[in-house]
Image (cartoon, rainbow, N blue to C red):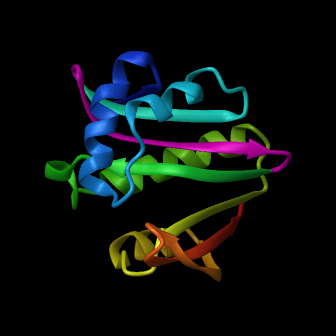
Amino acid sequence: MRFEPLRFEHLRQMAEIEKEAFDMPWTENMFIPELNCEDATYIVGTRGDEVICYGGFHTVLDEAHITNIAVKKGERGRGIGKFLMATLLAKAREKGVKHVTLEVKTTNLPAISMYEGFGFKAAGIRKRYYNNMYDALVMWLDV
């Protein structure tokens, strides 16, 4: 698997992974503006022409907000998410980021555990953030 910058041809497969991974998935069209956004950084893990994982963040001053991170269903549990997160954090550091934030569903214990392993700390709860039903844990990391 190799990481590369987000390109238009990745969008269809990313949208399929979104459907597998999230209750309120981004559509292909929702990703299009990310292609040309100066503040957005997205990387895609590919094996040949197949998208295996992707993640991205927006930068505001010295902070990064992780918007999406997902691994294809059949590829989960192999450490790909950790590799992806480490790569995203390295990209954020390259951009001079000092703080990283994200939201994660409070019931997504594997993801929360992974984020904690990188040093993220819980900083609050966003009530009914997902699908107006599920709470989100707000997490922060000082890099």
Residue at 48 percent across and 72 percent down: it is 132
Rendering coords of residue 86 (x, y %): 50, 51
Q: Assign the C terminus to one quadrant of the image.
A: bottom right
Residue at 33 percent across and 35 percent down: it is 14
Q: Is residue 30 left or right of residue 100?
A: left
Q: Is residue 20 left or right of residue 5?
A: left
| Residue 79 appears in view | yes
Q: How many discs appear? A: 0
Residue at 27 percent across and 31 percent down: it is 13
Q: Is residue 61 magenta?
A: yes
Q: Is residue 22 left or right of residue 38?
A: left
Residue reaching furthest to the left: 74
Query: In the image, is residue 99 above or below residue 110?
Result: above
Rendering coords of residue 70 (x, y %): 36, 50
Q: What's drawn in magenta, residue-wise? A: 48-62
Q: Assign the N terminus to one quadrant of the image.
A: top left
Residue at 73 percent across and 43 percent down: it is 59
Q: Main secondary structure of the magenta part?
A: strand
Which of the 4 image quadrants contains residue 17? Answer: top left
Which of the 4 image quadrants contains residue 37? Answer: top right
| Residue 1 appears in view | no
Q: Is residue 50 left or right of residue 129?
A: left
Residue reaching furthest to the right: 61
Rendering coords of residue 19 (x, y %): 27, 48
Residue reaching furthest to the front: 132
Query: In the image, is residue 67 above or below residue 35?
Result: below
Rendering coords of residue 5 (x, y %): 49, 24
